[in-house]
Image (tube, rainbow, N blue to C red):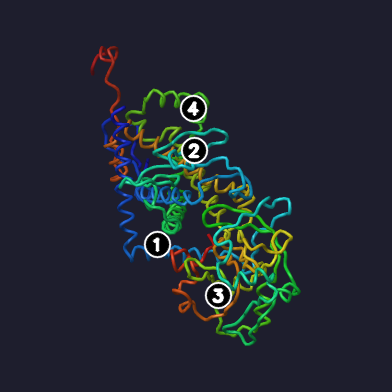
């Protein structure tokens, strides 16, 4: 029994080693990697099929909030422009809404804050596995899109950000279903205070049915486009372009 | 196992009988691949945030109930469960890759997919093979209800459910006494319990806790988070179920080896199983007059 147990463990370890190197080789094959990527498309279709268009992400009570909402990713954009805005308290900063819109907008923070607002206590779900519950206040993105008169060709919304990784600016994108979702807001407040710089001041996207990396911080410009092909490397976001994260981050 | 209407009373040790249906055999070997990929890619995903919490939320400010980490000097790996700490240098928290370089992630490279840290690739593997796990599982359940595999072969009989019979089965397992002859055609009670537990317990809990980690799914089905007691709990449940599945696999393999690997593995490939011979006749029975 001892011998067979030992041989069992050895062969299991050997098997896993062989399988592992085999799997890693397989994943280097572009066709197989492409096949694995099909999982994202299937998941996207099924999740959208199962969800009402406006199905809400769960909202929580004030008692359920994380005592500390951690920061992550970039916590202070490096550009001089951004540093200037911080010293001026974002007084002269403006959000640009352009691209495939009939009425391009340039709105100050004060203007955004005077628009109808939505406050929601929701869960931030990082792709890494940690979660935090926070209270976000901001302007529903759908209101801005209506005010800008989206052209019929527009299919995606691209969020251009002030922060960068090694000189490459951060950006993210969502489709119009998420763009007009009632919980999709451009947040200027976190936990009843003005959004701190570490969490994306002056404005960050909240798209509550997706993972953390979709929640673009330091949003400077919202661009309506027909296709994501010509933005960045064409995959719809900084992490999507650079390390092949899924564009649909619903899981 | 009783696929043909063979009169079981005529069967004896040494006979070759049909044991596993083709649906069972296909699903078994598919799972051999799928479960390993799911576990190994899952361990890599765990490496991205090697801490588990209970409740609705959990991040670095919160106290985990389970953590794999290493000291600041990168000399010792450790595992923390509740208030207990274990030194796991070399295996968990701090290990070495095949080329000798240091791996400061929670699970070592020889058990993760891919070998070197990549949350992206682990997610691609995990979220693709999740479909390969779920769809055939659902299909197997359907097929097994319609061909009555579950009702006939897996559901415990009334006789098996008697406390005395259950105790006898436990004692037999502890002594490594396994059924011989015609009695070996059927699963025994503990076997049925293990298979039913995986089929209707572990795999569904695995699927539901996995779906609870998806913000897209919890918007569509908010009851998932209610069922799991929160997203952080769901991640803990997912991890615990994975550990139980590993436990099942280890016991399963050990029993295959103990009972007879050749016969067992053949029965899972060809479906044919040779009934184990009855015990050699004892002195008393040998003295009985031979007819």
Q: Nearer the viewer, mark 2 or mark 4?
A: 2
The answer to whether marks 4 and 3 sit on the same chain is: no
Residue neighbourhood size for the residue with mark 3, other residues' Cα within 10 Å, grouped as few (<14), some (14–19), many (≥20): many
Relative to B132, is A115 on the left or the right? Answer: right
Q: Judge by depth and name the residue closer to the eye, A49 or A187.
A: A187
The quadrant the N terminus of chain B occupies is: top left
The alpha-carbon separation of the residues under discs 4 and 1 comes to: 45 Å
The alpha-carbon separation of the residues under discs 4 and 3 comes to: 63 Å
Residue at coordinates 31% horizontally, 51% vertically from top-left? A21
Q: Chain of mark 1?
A: A
The answer to whether marks 4 and 1 sit on the same chain is: no
Residue tagged by mark 2? Answer: B79
Chain-order first, disc 2 or disc 4: 2
Residue tagged by mark 3? Answer: A158
Q: Judge by depth and name the residue closer to the eye, B206 or A26.
A: A26
Q: Quadrant of residue A29?
A: bottom left
């Amino acid at each position: 029994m001892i011998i067979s147990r030992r041989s069992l463990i050895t062969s299991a370890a050997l098997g896993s080693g062989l399988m592992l190197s085999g799997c890693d080789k397989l994943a280097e094959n572009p066709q197989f990697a492409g096949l694995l990527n099909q999982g994202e498309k299937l998941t996207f279709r099924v999740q959208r099929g199962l969800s009402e268009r406006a199905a809400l992400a769960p909202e929580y009570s004030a008692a359920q909030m994380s005592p500390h909402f951690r920061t992550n990713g970039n916590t202070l954009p490096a550009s001089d422009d951004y540093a200037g805005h911080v010293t001026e308290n974002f007084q002269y900063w403006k959000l640009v809404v352009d691209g495939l819109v009939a009425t391009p907008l340039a709105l100050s923070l004060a203007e955004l804050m005077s628009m109808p607002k939505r406050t929601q206590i929701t869960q931030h779900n990082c792709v890494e596995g940690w979660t935090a519950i926070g209270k976000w206040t901001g302007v529903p993105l759908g209101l801005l899109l209506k005010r800008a008169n989206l052209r019929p060709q527009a299919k995606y919304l691209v969020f251009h950000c002030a922060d960068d990784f090694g000189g490459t600016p951060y950006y993210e994108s969502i489709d119009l279903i998420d763009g007009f979702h009632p919980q999709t807001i451009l947040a200027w407040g976190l936990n009843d205070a003005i959004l701190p710089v570490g969490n994306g001041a002056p404005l960050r996207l909240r798209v509550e049915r997706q993972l953390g990396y979709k929640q673009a911080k330091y949003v400077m410009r919202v661009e309506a486009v027909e296709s994501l092909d010509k933005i960045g490397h064409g995959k719809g976001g900084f992490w999507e372009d650079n390390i092949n994260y899924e564009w649909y981050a619903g899981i | 196992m009783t696929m043909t209407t063979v009169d079981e009373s005529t069967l004896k040790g040494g006979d070759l009988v049909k044991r596993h249906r083709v649906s069972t055999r296909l699903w078994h070997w598919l799972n051999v691949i799928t479960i390993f990929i799911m576990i190994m890619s899952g361990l890599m995903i765990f490496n991205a945030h090697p801490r588990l919490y209970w409740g609705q939320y959990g991040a670095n400010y919160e106290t985990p109930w389970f953590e794999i980490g290493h000291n600041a000097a990168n000399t010792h790996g450790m595992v923390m469960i509740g208030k207990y700490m274990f030194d796991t240098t070399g295996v968990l928290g701090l290990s070495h890759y095949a080329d000798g370089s240091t791996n400061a992630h929670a699970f070592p490279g020889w058990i993760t997919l891919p070998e070197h840290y990549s949350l992206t690739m682990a997610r691609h593997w995990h979220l693709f093979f999740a479909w390969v796990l779920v769809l055939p599982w659902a299909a197997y359940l359907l097929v097994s209800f319609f061909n009555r595999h579950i009702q006939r072969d897996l559901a415990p009989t009334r006789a098996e459910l008697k406390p005395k019979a259950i105790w006898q089965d436990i004692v037999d397992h502890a002594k490594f006494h396994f059924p011989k002859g015609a009695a070996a055609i059927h699963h025994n009670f503990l076997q049925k319990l293990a298979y039913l537990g995986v089929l209707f317990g572990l795999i569904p809990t695995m699927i539901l806790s996995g779906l609870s980690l998806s913000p897209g799914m919890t918007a569509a089905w908010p009851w998932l988070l209610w069922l799991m007691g929160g997203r952080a709990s769901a991640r803990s449940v997912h991890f615990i179920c994975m550990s139980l599945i590993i436990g099942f696999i280890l016991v399963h393999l050990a029993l295959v080896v103990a009972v007879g690997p050749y016969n067992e593995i053949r029965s899972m490939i060809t479906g044919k199983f040779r009934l184990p011979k009855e015990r050699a006749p004892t002195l008393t029975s040998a003295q009985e007059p031979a007819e």
